[in-house]
Amino acid sequence: VRFADEEKEEENKQEKTITNASSQPTNYHSSGKLAAEIVPVDPKQNEKSKFADEFKNIKEIGSGVYGRVFEAENILDKCKYAVKRIAFPRDSNEDLISKKLREVQAMAKFDHSNIVRYYGSWTERPPQDHNMYLHILMQLCKHSLAYWLMENYQQPRDQQRMRYLFKQLVDAVAYIHRKEVIHRDLKPSNILFDEVDRIRVCDLGLATNAISSIDGEEITGTRTVIGTPLYKSPEQSYNRYTSKVDVFSIGLIYAEMSVKMKGEVRRNAFDNYRKGVPNNFAIDDVETRELIDLMTKVKSDDRPTSREI
């Protein structure tokens, strides 16, 4: 499978994970226990690797700042999975390690048809290596929305299909927010298609827990400035924001799904949204155009919650 290159404006080259979601691998999930429980590997053992010993046909399918992603076939159940491997030095401080484990803890909470399925995780400390490796076993999908947009750039956009796909994305984001989590890095390369062309949100490495508001719909807190610049909301440049940052991001994504744009055209259009400058896109469907405008309001209070969408 050929994957799309990230646009120059994206800082991180995101992992392409990706199919065979129907079955679970043997010995990688627990019944009645927190799925994010890390299974440690004793560094005093032989130089055996759980990854190398229990999987075959391993090939890299993506890499980025936060790790590498492999497609691998489990020797016992014959199913293919995506394995995300994150390396950090043996002398890493507790704060760094806890940040690296955030994705595991976030994924373990979720059980939704539009979020990449999590199957388990473990760590390895190869004696001959100076790094410790966290492995995250998850659903393998076909390709990303970024890849689809690039491959189908010359084709007319089927607005009905785009609306159908966007609804799945909104369902996933609303579910994440109900779990009192903010994704913070929603973009086409973090939105995948599974084997039946269903949307699956992935890459929760930047997700963060947040404080619930009184009505339970909006979550807020003081957070680190983080996310991909192209798809960031205006307030994400500061250190206090709410779950509405995800709403702004999916508003930009919906605009990109509805109107063919890339490169400087896309950058300028998204900058206009952040500045509150109208974009005169030729979107025939009035409801779609109005919804995009509503989700991309400069002031977060003027945007709907994911539940309201």
Image (cartoon, rainbow, N blue to C red):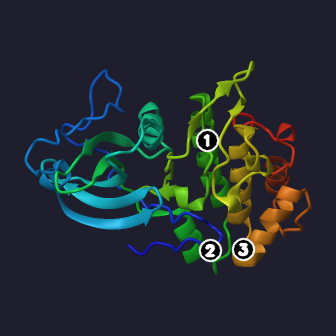
Helix or strand or loop: what does disc 1 sit on? helix
Q: Which residue is mark 3?
A: 261
Q: Which residue is mark 2?
A: 8
Asked if residue 107 lies left or right of residue 227, the reply is left
How far across and down, in percent of the image, does residue 266 sit? 74, 71
Helix or strand or loop: what does disc 2 sit on? loop
Q: Amino acid at mark 2?
A: Lys
- In primary-sequence order, the first of circles 2 and 3 is 2
Q: Which residue is mark 1?
A: 173
How far across and down, in percent of the image, does residue 159 sit? 70, 62
Q: Amino acid at mark 3?
A: Met
Residue 59 vertical placement versus 193 (above, below): below
Q: Quadrant of the C terminus?
A: top right
Residue at the far front in the pictured view: 91
Residue 41: assigned label: none
Measured Cα–Cα span from mark 2 to mark 1: 26 Å
Please report the residue visible at 37 percent of the width from the left and 60 percent of the height from the top: 68
Measured Cα–Cα span from mark 3 to mark 1: 24 Å
Q: Is residue 309 visible?
A: no
Q: Quadrant of the N terminus?
A: bottom left
Circles 3, 1 touching at the beta carbon (< 8 Å): no
- In primary-sequence order, the first of circles 3 and 1 is 1
How far across and down, in percent of the image, does residue 263 sit? 70, 77
Asked if residue 248 lies left or right of residue 281, the reply is left
Which residue is nearer to you in this view: 95 or 235?
Answer: 95
Residue 239 vertical placement versus 147 (above, below): above
- In primary-sequence order, the first of circles 2 and 1 is 2
Q: Amino acid at mark 1?
A: Val
Quadrant location of residue 208? top right
Q: Is residue 3 visible?
A: yes
Which residue is nearer to you in this view: 104 or 173?
Answer: 104
